[in-house]
Amino acid sequence: MSIFEFVKSHVDIVDVVSTYVRLKKMGNYWKGSCPFHKENDASFTVSPDKQIFYCFGCHESGDLISFVAKHEALSPIESLSSLIEKYDLKIPQELLKESGKFNSNRQAHNAHFELSKLFAHYARTNLEKNPAALSYLEKRGVSKTQIERFCIGILPSGRASINGLVAHARKAGFLSKDLINAGILIESRSTTYSPFEDRILFPIRDISGKFVAFGGRVYQPRDTRPKYYNSKESECFLKRQLLFGIDLARPILQSTGIGYLVEGYLDCIAMSQYGYVGTVATLGTSCTDEHLKLLSRYIHTLFVVYDGDNAGTNAIIRLAERCWQTDIELQIITLPEGEDPASLLTSETPHKNIFKNTEHIFDFFVKSTGKGYLKKTLSQKIQTSKKIINLITKVTNPIKQDLLLQQAAQSMQVPFTSLKSTCTNPNTTQTTDVKTSAHNKVSLEEKIFFISLCGADAEKNVTDFIITEAVIQYFPKSWHNMLQLLLKMNVHEQGKAGVKKFLNTLTEKERNKVLLGLFKHEPETTPMHFKQLLSLLASKHWKEAISIMKNKVQIAQKQGDSKRVEQLLLAISKMNHMKQ
């Protein structure tokens, strides 16, 4: 038993999920609205027997550890640690010894968080001793309340400052090498310095409030270094997954269902200061699918407030091209040219009306992409139309797709039928229905596989439900790896491997495939019925399977493997018997 299996055996998935989702018991399952996408139907299903979950809407799936990891944007290791602490589990010493990698990773991550926290508060204290930095923040309109709230600080430049930081860290049990490993200090041939020296520091925290990284901004007029410097990415800090201010914004996001997205630290702080508390910022990178997915767990509407320049416009266009797979309504707040949220909010310009004037992201996309459409050449018009249509085809809802096409046709002053005819996927409804039908169909091979898998958990003679090597020959190649694993485990454990143990041996792709099948049907059968299904399978693939087995017999004979020959001939005999 691994430490992961120990935790899953001592914590019930229904108890964990019910702290996040309102569940209702329906037969053998518990159901509720999915926390990973917005929906009206209860597509989210939890199986207390198998200790797994599956959403028939967005297809998220897994066990209680992956549920916490997905919901809290944690790594599996962090999720495991969170459950151990929350449920006060006492891990046996033998498991702790066996899971040395887990312990070392956990300790390393915790040490990084603690060191980052120490550095953040050290820099925060230094800010009070730096009139120039305080003056800069005051000019930018940052209040003392926001300085405290976001733990803004500074690391003065110079050898004395570095020595002071090292001494401060040493008192807390950290060494210079720890500061170097965390990217706070850099060691060169001649000296040790910090890339954050003489920069305003903005600590970056994850969704649970742990300090993970830093952003530093120059503030001296004569400083010629790049304006911003962010911590290097690591296991604890991935820009594509983190949003600045998410830990502070989360409560308001959950309560209102509305959020604001800006580009920079100071923009986020200014928005929060002026009442837009549910504001987050990307970390010097474009908004990613993972950012949108994270936000979709808490909100239904996101207002995008990017800078009023070409870069801001292009960023919104890129965002429009990727937002359709996330169930969030995106609204654009267009700022005056040359303005950003921080400059606008801290100026004397009345901003309240500007922040009330919103535009749906598709309207913005069509307006920006199709700007001057009538004056374009024929080839330019075709290219523009294709770009807009390609965006619309990403919308899976056929009604919404047609509404967007009508909107685009009106904006570009072209017939709706022209756009519709050039749409690369005009039969969305039909295609979706066909896919759904095929998706829900359970083949004979699948039935046999899931009966064999679930038979290991049943109160009966499970050896009657073990798939043999002969039967594996009938299955598509995509199933072979899982079937071999199942056979190996059942033979080794006399048919009592169990669903949970089997799932732990699979890749994420294989696990999702099996989870979907487990929730599509509950395989209840008798040994006699199972044998009948095997007979049907034998009839379906008999000639092909016999040919394969005979080839294997010839190979084994050439190799002089008499034991293997005997096993194969026995398998052929069983197959012939099933065919009769």
Image (cartoon, rainbow, N blue to C red):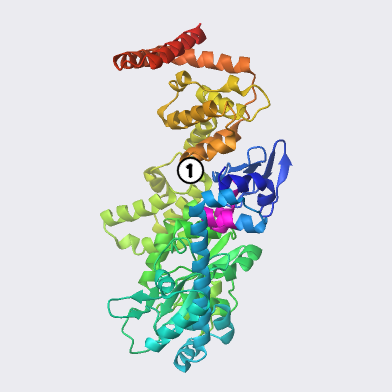
State the image quarter where residue 187 is shown. Answer: bottom left
- Observer-nearest of 46 and 16: 16
Q: Residues within 10 Å of mark 1 (few under 14, many from 20)?
A: few
Q: Is residue 520 left or right of residue 481?
A: right
- Observer-nearest of 318 and 384: 318
Q: Which residue lies at the image location 37% right of the left edge and 45% below the top edge?
A: 422
Residue 571 on image: x %, y %: 45, 14
| Magenta stretch, residue numbers | 63-81
User: Quick check: is 25 in the magenta stretch?
Assistant: no
In this rendering, does residue 442 appear at all?
no
- Observer-nearest of 131 and 2: 2
Residue under numbered circle 1: 508
Residue 387 on image: x %, y %: 36, 54
Q: Secondary structure at mark 1?
A: helix
The amino acid on which the numbered mark 1 sits, given as a three-letter code, is: Glu
Q: Quadrant of the N terminus?
A: top right
Q: Is residue 155 left or right of residue 57?
A: left
Magenta region's main secondary structure?
A: helix
Residue 443 on image: x %, y %: 52, 25
286 in relation to 572, above or below:
below
Q: Which residue lies at the image location 51% right of the left edge and 85% below the top edge?
A: 346
The outermost residue toward the top is: 580
